[in-house]
Image (tube, rainbow, N blue to C red):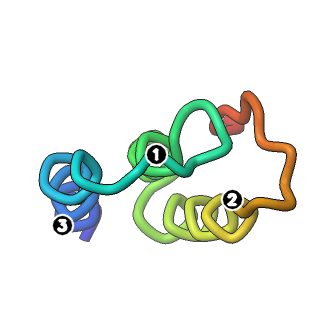
């Protein structure tokens, strides 16, 4: 499961992200955050952390530096 999620995120980064305008308000970007979260915490907890991060990435959020918590 973990490998499949990482493959899907890498596919997004390679195929879709270059043609879409940059909109992420955080550093690292949401997709890089998702990769780190899944690698550090596993498929389930990492996906939950990434989903919460994506929900916070909107125009009314300040954004900024937001690394994956250990």
Q: Can you identify the residue that label 3 sits on?
A: 4
Which residue is rendered at x = 21% and y = 64% of the image? 8
Left-right relation of 43 to 25:
left
- Mark 2 crowdedness (10 Å alpha carbons): few <14, some 14-19, many ≥20: some
1 or 2: mark nearer the eye: 1
| Location of residue 54 in the rendering, given as x and y in whole percent from the top left corner | 61, 64
Residue 14 circle label = none
Please say if 48 is above or below 49.
below
Mark 3 or 1, nearer chain start: 3
Label 3, secondary structure: give it. Answer: helix
Quadrant where the N terminus sits is: bottom left
Residue 39 found in image quarter: top left
- Mark 3 crowdedness (10 Å alpha carbons): few <14, some 14-19, many ≥20: few
Residue 5 found in image quarter: bottom left
3 or 1: mark nearer the eye: 1
Mark 1 or 2, nearer chain start: 1
| Location of residue 20 in the rendering, given as x and y in whole percent from the top left corner | 32, 56
Q: Are marks 1 and 2 in contact (CB under 8 Å)?
A: no
Quadrant where the C terminus sits is: top right
Label 2, secondary structure: give it. Answer: loop
Please say if 30 is above or below 54.
above
Left-right relation of 7 to 50:
left
Q: Can you identify the residue that label 1 sits on?
A: 22
Q: Are marks 3 and 2 in contact (CB under 8 Å)?
A: no
Which residue is rendered at x = 46% and y = 45% of the image? 22
3 or 2: mark nearer the eye: 2
The foreground one among 27 and 44 is: 27
Residue 57 circle label = 2
Which residue is rendered at x = 76% and y = 32% of the image? 64
| Location of residue 56 in the rendering, given as x and y in whole percent from the top left corner | 75, 63
Label 1, label 2: how far apart the Cα atoms are: 12 Å
Mark 3 or 2, nearer chain start: 3
């Amino acid at each position: 499961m973990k490998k499949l999620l990482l493959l899907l995120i890498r596919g997004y980064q390679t195929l879709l992200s270059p043609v879409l305008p940059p909109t992420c308000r955080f550093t690292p970007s949401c997709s890089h955050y998702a990769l780190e979260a899944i690698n550090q915490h596993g498929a389930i907890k990492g996906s939950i952390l990434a989903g919460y991060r994506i929900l916070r990435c909107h125009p009314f959020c300040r954004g900024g530096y937001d690394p994956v918590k250990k």
